[in-house]
Amino acid sequence: MRPDPTPSPSSPRFARVVLPIPVDQPFTYQIPDAMLGRVAIGCRVGVPFGKRALSGVVVDLLDHTDVPRTRAISEIEDVFAPPPLLELARWMASYYGCSRGEALQSVLPPSMRRAKVKAKPTGMLCVVDDALRRGGETSDTYAKAQASLARAKRQLALLTELVSAGGEAPVPVVLEEWGYAREVLDGLVARGIARIDPVDAASPLDSLEARVDWLNDEQKQALTLVTDALHSREFRPVLLYGVTGSGKTEVYLRAARHVVEEGGGCIVLVPEIGLLPQATARYRRAFGDLVAIIHSRLTGPERFDIWERIERGEHRVVVGPRSAVFSPVRDLRLIVVDEEQDESYKQDDKPRYHARSVALVRGKMEKLTVVLGSATPSAESLRWAREGKYALARLPKRVAGGVLPEIEIVDMREPDARGAVLSPRLSEHIEETLRADRQAIVFLNKRGHARTVQCLACGWVAMCKNCDVSLTFHRVDGRLKCHLCGYSRAVPASCDACNGRLLRYSGIGTQRVELELKSMFPGVGVLRMDADTTSGKDGHRRILEEFSTRQYPILLGTQMVTKGHHFPGVGLVGVVSAEEGLNFPDFRSPERTFQQLTQVAGRAGRADGAGRVVIQTYTPDHSVFRHLCAHDYDAFIAEELELRRRLGYPPFARIVLASCSSTNAELLSAFMENWAGRLRESLAGRGVAVLGPSPPLVPRVKNRFREQILLKGPVSQAHKDETLDAFRRLAENRRGASGIELRWDVDPESFFW
Ligand code: ADP
Ligand code: ZN
Ligand code: ZN
């Protein structure tokens, strides 16, 4: 609760303020008379700092100070950080190695002094026809509506979405989350297909109508485990391990409802890309205006507005991506981390926090129940569940029944497949699928590798002039581009090194697969989904929509096709170059590959009829593919954990990746050698290995050279602090070292930067 002290002559006259700069000391400011009694711990205030004006957070109030000449606070901003969040920021700062002010910048919404937020559109958009509401896409009325909307594609898409969301959705959701223009919505209303009903905001809980009447036995057990944890009022982590479609979300919804009925609040974290209409609509339906849905398209003022509503207790359920873990929910009892293994929970900028770790720490500090849910949990979480640190609930089968798709591995070393983009097996299956009038997804598993130009005579490869990476060929504009810095050049007519004219394109990209598909299946529509085709505001959504309304039989794409939407028409999933992810130099590569392939396999055959998955690989004997065929994630993780135990990787050790960059390669090398030497002296005897310095995967980016040191072992807070201290001392004492930038990553989730 925001404190509201009455000003009195004895009110503190000084405030200690942490600032968003890499200095961990609070600065002391004077509280001007006009603000006496109104500045509380946790307030965000505007202060002068040198020639700049900064936003900081008050962490302490003082009656006196020894600081000689203090400057005055210039204004009190609207945001207030409740004490538990200040505590959380303090932990983040020390654990992830940044200042408290920097940590608070991630915790609080962007600074928005007195921003105006427009009034929200309201109402519930409902499908008028009852048969259509109940029968969904199979009803006659849907066919009729479809015919009448043949020339209004957006309206048809909206209707389809509305029907699949249960026949109704709040207007703000349709406009903001689903991304439809107001005209599209009004169009459906004008045709009499939908209408807008007023929402009864009086008591959203009364209208809380569960669409699922009963839970199956496994769901009941899982829910009991969670509610028992809630009633204990202790910190209790629960791992909910259930295949896709096993009813995990239903368990989250009921647990959240339980919490709300008891007057508490909860946070549900979802991966950013998973913030798709179908999932969020369920929370809306269950909680009405009590739920706040946070997504990346919200503007600063909107985020700020939501923060305040949450703080006032107007929203008691918050659904959002990683930053939602910091929501100032009143009487917080529960945090759910859905798809807990997802990479998007790790923030890529300073402070490089992991939302799952933050959720667990917040849970411990505030005595919460923390539910981690996944179809393929991280090796870390599975280890803790096995060892009893987390309670484990399993949902082994899909609610709707149905068999898991059959997985077939195609050995690309066989003579008829070698060198092909699409093997004969895969093309046969695509053909069969199309003949059966079902849809196919072709997934290209690529990561960091792409098509580039190579000289057949001397082996020269077109490289970026600023970064040590090859340039990628883009068919759209026929240029070679750097994915790291954006540098681009025209495709050369001859080799830069030998002037030879025999250049060829190497590596497979989505565009290449698209050409192949189009030539193999002439006249068949192929929808391509990759960074190029989804760049617009709604590119991603639009493509998924076009595919789900069956305007195209084939969807081709990268990682993006693996998550989210439910496509009833898909009978086949083909995976091209499945091992590319495995070749990535990261100890988590096999785990990620397995998770990703499971996710993409889950797209096949979810409704009408069984599904099939065809995976092309040059390494069919790899443990990933063996266990994948048997759908045996447990056996796979057991092997992985054994391997990690032997090699001393997480979760059996901690890793810190300390990387530096500089424009001066020699200076950087000397600096890193020196630093690593000192660390070895101080840490090696205490069981922590200091590896490096070594060049990262890409040793130069935007003309800055890079080197890294890895700490590995039982790395404690003291070890981290000493390492950072050594860095600061070296950087202060060596001439020229001030140009060295440090990138400090505790518990890195990726070694590619
Ligand atoms: P998950 O989150 O594990 O993928 P969901 O909770 O989304 O699974 O459930 C998949 C589908 O099954 C949803 O459409 C949901 O409404 C439905 N469902 C979940 N539990 C039940 C149940 N006990 N009875 C009937 N349908 C259910
Ligand atoms: Zn050449
Ligand atoms: Zn570049």
Image: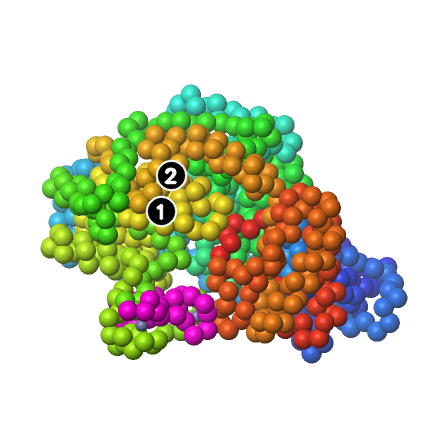
Whether residue 83 is visible to the viewer of this picture, yes or no, is no
Q: Position of residue 433 (x, y in %)?
A: 16, 41
Instruction: Please report the residue visible at 60 percent of the width from the left and 59 percent of the height from the top.
Output: 693
Residue 230 within the segment the image draws in magenta: no
Q: Is residue 291 left or right of residue 417?
A: right
Instruction: Please report the residue visible at 26 percent of the width from the left and 36 percent of the height from the top.
Output: 408
The magenta region covers: 457-483
Considering only order in the chain, which callout, 1 or 2, is on the residue closer to the N terminus?
A: 1
Q: Residues within 10 Å of mark 1 (few under 14, many from 20)?
A: many
Q: Are marks 2 and 1 in contact (CB under 8 Å)?
A: yes
Q: Kindly state the secondary structure of the residue where label 2 is placed.
A: loop
Which label sits on residue 622? Answer: 2
Q: Is residue 255 left or right of residue 610?
A: right
Determine which quarter of the picture holds residue 152: bottom left
Q: Main secondary structure of the magenta part?
A: loop
Instruction: Please report the residue visible at 65 percent of the width from the left and 68 percent of the height from the top.
Output: 670
From this view, report whether residue 91 is shown above or below residue 667: above
